[in-house]
Amino acid sequence: MSRWFLYFLFYSLGGYVLEKLFARAVHSEKQVRKCFLLLPLCPVYGLAMTALLALSPPELGFGGLVLLGAAVCTAVEYAVHLFYDRVFHVRFWDYRCLRWHIRGRVCPQFSIIWGLLSAAAVRQIQPAVVTAAARVPPWAVFLLWMALAADCVLTAALLLRRRDTELLAIPAAAAQMRAESQSSTS
């Protein structure tokens, strides 16, 4: 079980890095590219990759892996977006500006990208991730679980209260809290 948790963390961190690179490359106005307050993680990537790893048979060729990756990643992306929308009333991404999107949650252009990236990750990156995960001691896994759990609680409280993903940048959250404390003392 701990190895799957470590896979999730690794790919969530990798997704965060991809998101930051993408935001810089396209000069995005939205620079906050994580889904937690403290940890630099995008869980949609971790969930999608662990689902793909669990569902993909070892004998599947690269083309089949691209198709399965596109389908699994798109399904996870839709489900995660729906969860954030329904539970926290926030949107971390919005594809409504792209053709053939489905409610702004998924689109074929990114499904193709997810398929290619996930297939490459399974073939090229996952063997090293397996080796690294096997070396992590149980006490470190426990600490990672605790850190993620604490961050989930803090993030959920912030999103439920403010419904603003931009506050997941610590300076923005701190500024918001200062403003609130100053207005309550006035």
Image: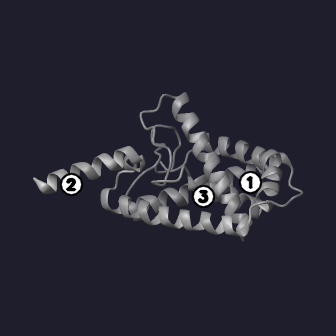
Do the residues bearing badges 1 and 2 touch, measured as CB atoms within 8 Å?
no
Residue in view at x 41 percent, y 65 percent? 87
Distance, label 3 to label 1, CA atoms, is 12 Å
Q: Of marks 1 and 2, which one's residue comes earlier in the chain?
A: 1
Q: Quadrant of residue 146?
A: bottom right
The three-letter amino acid code for the residue at tag 3 is Val
Q: Which residue is mark 1?
A: 68
Q: Quadrant of residue 131?
A: bottom right
Mark 3, secondary structure of its residue = helix
Q: Mark 1, residues whose alpha carbon is within 10 Å: few (<14), some, or many (≥20)?
A: some
Q: Nearer the viewer, mark 3 or mark 2?
A: 2
Frontmost residue, 124 versus 111: 124
Where in the figure is residue 171, as x and y percent of width and height?
A: 37, 44
Where in the figure is residue 63, as x and y percent of width and height?
A: 81, 46
* Direction left: furthest residue: 186
Frontmost residue, 41 versus 179: 179
Residue in view at x 81 percent, y 50 percent? 128
Mark 1, secondary structure of its residue = helix
Report the disc number at residue 41: none
The three-letter amino acid code for the residue at tag 2 is Ser
Tell me: 42 left or right of 28: right
Q: Nearer the viewer, mark 3 or mark 1?
A: 3
The three-letter amino acid code for the residue at tag 1 is Leu
Report the disc number at residue 181: 2
Distance, label 1 to label 2, CA atoms, is 50 Å
Q: Which residue is mark 3?
A: 76
Residue in view at x 58 percent, y 34 percent? 21
Residue in view at x 57 percent, y 45 percent? 16
